[in-house]
Image: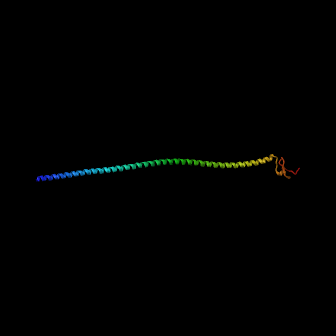
């Protein structure tokens, strides 16, 4: 009996150990399975996070490209405006040069006009005297008694002398 008891106890112990081992194995399997699920969840979260970061980076790259294109467009506009400003400055210089030339010509024209008017006045005076001499007109002094006349030899004689 003793043998049977001992055998039973040993079998029982063995069964308990086996049961414990099985429980442990089950627990380990479950733990591994849980661990595997945990790792999968972490991997999924990391993948999702990386995908979100990729989307953000793509958005930033698009924004950067848009800003770069905008900058290039603005730079082109600035260059175009600078060219137009330069052209306007050249036109302004030409206008200033023409304005100066016109004012100089106006001054010269005014001077020439004054000279012409003086010449016309002198010419009229000269024509008036010449007209009087050609018409045989003489001064009023010559018509007055006692006035002196000139002889062809240049000496004066009085009209009172007959």
In front here: 15 or 158? Answer: 15
In front here: 148 or 129? Answer: 129
- Position in image of residue 19 (x %, y %): 20, 52
Which residue is pictured at 73% across the width and 48% down the height?
Answer: 120
**In this rendering, position of residue 98 left or right of residue 19:** right
Which residue is pictured at 42% across the width and 48% down the height?
Answer: 62
For this orientation, the residue located farthest to the top is: 134
For this orientation, the residue located farthest to the left is: 1
Q: How many labels does the image show?
A: 0
- Position in image of residue 25 (x %, y %): 23, 50
**In this rendering, position of residue 120 left or right of residue 150:** left
- Position in image of residue 124 (x %, y %): 75, 48
Colour mode of the rendering: rainbow
Which residue is pictured at 39% across the width and 49% down the height?
Answer: 55
- Position in image of residue 116 (x %, y %): 71, 48
In front here: 96 or 125? Answer: 96
In front here: 85 or 147? Answer: 85
């Amino acid at each position: 009996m003793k043998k049977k008891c001992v055998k039973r106890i040993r079998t029982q112990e063995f069964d308990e150990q086996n049961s414990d081992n099985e429980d442990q194995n089950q627990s380990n399997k479950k733990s591994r399975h849980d661990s595997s699920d945990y790792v999968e969840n972490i991997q999924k979260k990391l993948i999702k996070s990386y995908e979100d970061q990729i989307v953000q980076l793509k958005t930033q790259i698009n924004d950067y490209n848009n800003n770069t294109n905008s900058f290039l467009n603005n730079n082109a506009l600035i260059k175009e405006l600078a060219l137009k400003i330069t052209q306007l400055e050249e036109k302004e210089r030409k206008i200033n040069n023409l304005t100066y030339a016109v004012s100089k010509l106006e001054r010269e024209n005014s001077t020439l006009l004054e000279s012409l008017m003086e010449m016309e006045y002198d010419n009229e005076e000269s024509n008036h005297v010449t007209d009087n001499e050609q018409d045989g007109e003489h001064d009023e002094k010559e018509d007055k008694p006692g006035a002196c006349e000139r002889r062809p030899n240049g000496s004066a004689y009085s009209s009172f002398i007959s």
